[in-house]
Image (cartoon, rainbow, N blue to C red):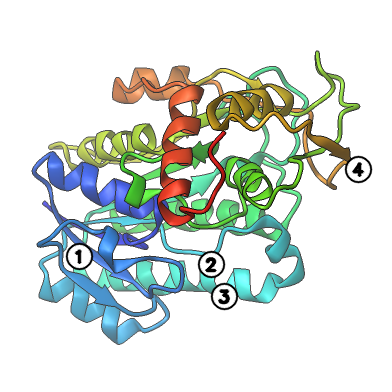
Amino acid sequence: MTWLITGGAGYIGAHVARSMTAAGERVVVLDDLSTGVAERLPAGIPLIRGSLLDRELVDRTLTGHGVTGVVHLAGKKQVGQSVEQPLTYYRENVHGLTVLLEAVVAAGVGRFLFSSSAAVYGVPDVELITEHTPAVPINPYGETKLAGEWLVRATGRAHSIATGCLRYFNVAGAAEPELSDIGVFNIIPMFFDRISRGEAPRIFGADYPTPDGTCIRDYIHVADLADAHLAAARRLAAPGAGGDLTVNIGRGEGVSVRELADLVADVTGDRTEPVVEARRPGDAARAVASVELIAGELGWTATRGVREMVESAWEGWRLRHPAAPVR
């Protein structure tokens, strides 16, 4: 097998590329480097710089490298930005996927693994979110991921392509400091950013119906997430593989924002009391994955805890921000 990883120079993509190559898989990366970093990739992985909207480039990449399977991670992923720029999100996430799938069909590629999101579920009022929980996204980002799942499955059925859709929960941490998340859009980097600027971390809403009043989330270490991609890719590549696979990727354990803030304080040594601000629109009180299906289907389970996520993320943050205070 030769796998094309779209978005493979990004935060998650580089971890997936490293996990797959370490396991002996042949990998080629297509990335426009709008958020990706070429230096994240291991030596020897071919990197094609360009957009999925460039059908000619995608065709050349698939045929020129003898691609037999695709892991599709490229796309826009900021919820707030998607509300402000829905046309951009539909163009990049849905039209870009359409162009890629057209090229996949034309090239006879038989395996396709799609990076989806727990955002497809919206704000379900359940203890654990299963793959059968109704998907009712509440923002354009979640809508594009759900539409992407529909498109992937329909294409797979029509053209006998084995497909998988992986619904990520909250991704954090780093396998190596140089692979850490360089954005400040997720909660742990947001905490680090405030601490580094001498400001109090922010908690959005402390009046939710949870034990400490703050939102509860399921956090997954990015290295575990990468290993889940490898397990899913090998499942699709197995002889006789067919149909479609849709699974949650999480730990199945909830951590409140207050608990996470306390852990960040312990790891960084910064004991500044967080400030509580107004709730953000659309935040669910609780969003925790049921992980029974992925364990049964792939024999995969997360092995890394939340402390390891925070510690590895802080190490990466300090690599890029050496002036960050050490207390």
Residue 162 seen anywhere in this rendered image of the structure: no
Question: Residue type at mark 3?
Answer: Arg
Q: Are marks 4 and 3 in contact (CB under 8 Å)?
A: no
Question: Residue type at mark 4?
Answer: Ala
In the picture, measured across the screen, residue 251 lies left or right of residue 140, that is left
Residue placed under numbered mark 2 in the picture: 94
Residue placed under numbered mark 1 in the picture: 108
Query: Disc 1 and disc 2: Cα gap in Å?
Result: 21 Å
Query: Disc 1 and disc 4: Cα gap in Å?
Result: 51 Å
Question: Residue type at mark 1?
Answer: Gly
Q: Nearer the viewer, residue 232 or 26?
A: 26
- The earlier-in-sequence mark between 4 and 3 is 3
The residue shown at (34%, 23%) is 297
Q: Nearer the viewer, residue 66 or 305?
A: 305
* Residue 111 x/y as whole percent: 25, 51
* Residue 314 x/y as whole percent: 48, 39
Q: Are marks 3 and 2 in contact (CB under 8 Å)?
A: yes
Circle 4 or circle 3, nearest the eye: 4
Q: Is residue 241 above or below residue 258?
A: below
- The earlier-in-sequence mark between 1 and 3 is 3
Numbered label attached to residue 278: 4
The residue shown at (53%, 27%) is 267
The C terminus - image quarter: top right
Question: Residue type at mark 2?
Answer: Val
In the picture, measured across the screen, residue 237 lies left or right of residue 193, that is left
Residue placed under numbered mark 3 in the picture: 91
